[in-house]
Image (cartoon, grey):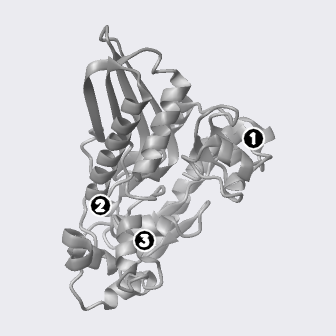
Amino acid sequence: MDAFYASIEQRDDPRLMGKPVIVGASPDRRGVVCAASYEARAYGVRSAMPSRTAQKLCPDGVFIRPRMEAYRTESHQIMAKLATFGGEVEQVSVDEAYLDMTHRFEEPTRQALVELGRQMKEVIRAERRLTASIGIGTNKLLAKIASDHGKPDGLFCITEEEKVNFLRPLPASAIHGVGKVTAEALHSIGLRTIGDIQDYRGDLRAVVGSFAQKVKSYAFGDDTRPLDLDGDVKSISAEETFERDTDDRRILVPVLKDQAREIAAKLGKERLAARTVQVKVRYSDFKTVTRQTSVEEPFESAETIYAIACAILRRGCLVERPLRLIGLGVSGLVPPSTQMIFSFGGK
């Protein structure tokens, strides 16, 4: 979906249409941006940045407190609409999904696939008054890349015949799983575009390790990942129980930073990013409190995870007394920098 949280706020309050809407904490509080409309993004506002920074970049921004229940309800209705088109649905997060339409077509043509995408967009626009960007391809990788083409309100198809040439000029970071660190490693040997990777005759294992074979396959538009239909909630977390209860910042800060680094390393290993940070605290009487914040754009760095965790702790006044345990987790796991994508193909 296009700027999902902010678009819902603009739809529900027409006075916000065309204005730079920033969903998140008020700039006079220590908090972060959960989502930004395209008008706000034009000023450089992005999710997970401090709200105070967002206000400096966009002084006329309209800050809206997030309504997560409303966003989840909207998501449920949109996914239900998409399911009526048949095929299997893998919901990746609250505002993105893959649809595998393999069995709907014996020999799908570009025209037929694009028409199906157009119908889906029209249903979402007519019944939910929101816009979606749809990418069509024979696998997840191509559908994801196609969905980024022409956002917002995009509709684009990448066929098997054209995929290799289409991918050539794109940056290496467009490949699923190539985050900032991997992209920098590729850049260090002169591989800046997908075409560079296609043409490279050296051993990529020296640069990206065990990810080398997949990087090469993805560079040619080949992706055998099936849809994940198990519906399990996926998350990564870490926690620590203290020998003595403490509210000492000199102890808590290093622990949180270590947990953020551990989680970021696991995200990197799995080639994933997250959309939600959760903090858990337990007091001496064993009372346990959890709070979480979700943002619209995926994140994967330890710095971002730590910053959001600190904002949650401050906002909830969670260190109001000594802690027996503190834990940190992320969920809403998606490919790095992914957007809403629909796959209409198969093997």
Q: Is residue 270 above or below residue 11?
A: below
Q: Position of residue 19 (x, y in %)?
A: 77, 48
Q: Position of residue 310 (x, y in %)?
A: 48, 35
Question: How many residues crowd mark 1 within 10 Å: few (<14), some (14–19), many (20+)?
Answer: some
Which residue is painted at 26% across and 57% down in the image? 269
**Looking at this view, is 149 or 25 the one in front?**
25
Question: How many residues crowd mark 2 within 10 Å: few (<14), some (14–19), many (20+)?
Answer: some
User: Label 2 sits on what residue type?
Assistant: His
**Looking at this view, is 96 or 21 the one in front?**
21
Q: Is residue 11 visible?
A: no
Q: Position of residue 283 (x, y in %)?
A: 35, 14
Which residue is painted at 63% across and 40% down in the image? 23
- SS for callout 3: helix
- Give the residue number, with chain letter if any, for mark 2: 103
Q: Earlier in the sequence, mark 1 or mark 2?
A: 1
Residue 8 sits in quarter: top right
Numbered label attached to residue 62: 1
- Farthest residue, direction top: 285
Q: Earlier in the sequence, mark 3 or mark 2?
A: 2
In this image, 312 relative to 214: left or right?
right
Contact (CB < 8 A) between labels 1 and 2? no
**Looking at this view, is 75 or 248 the one in front?**
248
Q: Position of residue 249 (x, y in %)?
A: 43, 29
Numbered label attached to residue 173: 3
State the separation of the CA atoms marked 1 and 3: 32 Å
